[in-house]
Each structure stands twice: as structure tokens, then as C-alpha cells.
Amino acid sequence: MTAASRPRRVLVVCLGNICRSPLGAAVLAHRGGSAVEVRSAGLRDKHAGRPAHPLMIDAAAALGYDLTGHRGRRVDRDLIGWADTVLAMDHAVLSALHALAVPPDLPKLRLYLDGQDVPDPYGGDTTAFAEVAAVIDAGADRHL
């Protein structure tokens, strides 16, 4: 299957892959339907194999997205190479991705939001997660 005949591949990356990137991937997959294949990952392996944060599962559910099946994974060069577009949730993640990616993959790296960070709600309360979920939900259409 050639790139032209398959769905566009999008990778969403945050720090731990339990809060922002799983929701970003769920939103893009839902809205993009069969036109996109979406995965998510994190820079750290601390949460690899773990479910999404309980407060993000709740915030996502309030918006109509199901994160209960999510399991964290760490980003690597193969995953970056798989993607047509790699969306970083903040400038620090984008910088780390630039350091990890090989030169041919650098043009596909960009921020989820134009020029601004999606705040990391980790350690925050229900309101913090709900606010970040709303930002992620609102920012998705620009990628489809």
C-alpha cells in the first residue's frame, strides 16, 4: 500500500502518554474516521503499559471519547518514521522529538496547537483536566 492509497498516519506525543496525547489521538481518530490512522506515545517510559490517567479518562468521557482501552507507550524512531505527521503537545516535547528524529523525519514534526503549548494537567485537579481536554478537543480540526 502506498502513502497515497492509505489513511494519513498521525502520531500525537506528550511527556508520559497518559494525559494529553491519548486524548489528542482519540479526538483525531474519531473526527478523521477512515481517512486517518492515529497513534499516541510519550517521551518517558515510566507509564509504558499503563492506562490513561483516571481524571483524563473522565474528562474525555465528558466530551464523548473513550480512553479506557489506552495503554501508554514510549515514542521511538520507528514510530516517528511510521507517521506522516507528528504532533507534539508542547515546545519541550517538540524539542525532544527533534533530538530523537532522523533528518528525513524532521519536517513532519510540529506542535498540536500553532505556536503554543497544550498545558500538562498531570498533578492537577478535575478542573485542570477538563480545561486541557477542551483545548485538545478544540484544536483537533486543524489537523484533519
Image: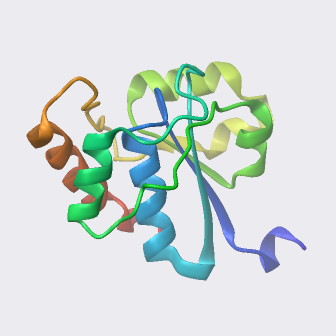
Which residue is at the front of the view, 68 or 60?
Answer: 68
Image quadrant where one finds the N terminus = bottom right
Q: Position of residue 69 (x, y in %)?
A: 51, 55
Q: Quadrant of residue 76?
A: top right
Residue 95 against residue 117 in the figure, above or below: above
Q: Is residue 127 left or right of residue 16?
A: left
| Residue 7: image location, x then y, percent | 69, 73
Q: Nearer the viewer, residue 98 or 50?
A: 50
Q: Going by the image, does 116 lie left or right of 46?
A: left
In this rendering, is residue 81 above or below 85? Answer: above
Scheme of colours in the image: rainbow
Q: Position of residue 23 (x, y in %)?
A: 39, 52
The residue depicted at 32 percent of the width and 50 percent of the height is 57
Question: Residue 79 at what x, y percent from top left?
Answer: 73, 41
Identity of the residue drawn at 56% across and 21% down: 44
Picture quadrant of residue 106: top right
Residue 47 seen in render: yes
**Residue farthest along the right direction in this orientation:** 1
As drawn, 131 above or below 27: above
Residue at (25, 52) in percent of width and height: 58
* Picture mark count: 0
Compared across the picture, whether 74 is left or right of 25 comes to right
The answer, for residue 143, to whether it is visible in the render is no
Is 19 placed left or right of 96 in the picture? Answer: left
Where 33 sits versus 141, above or below?
A: below
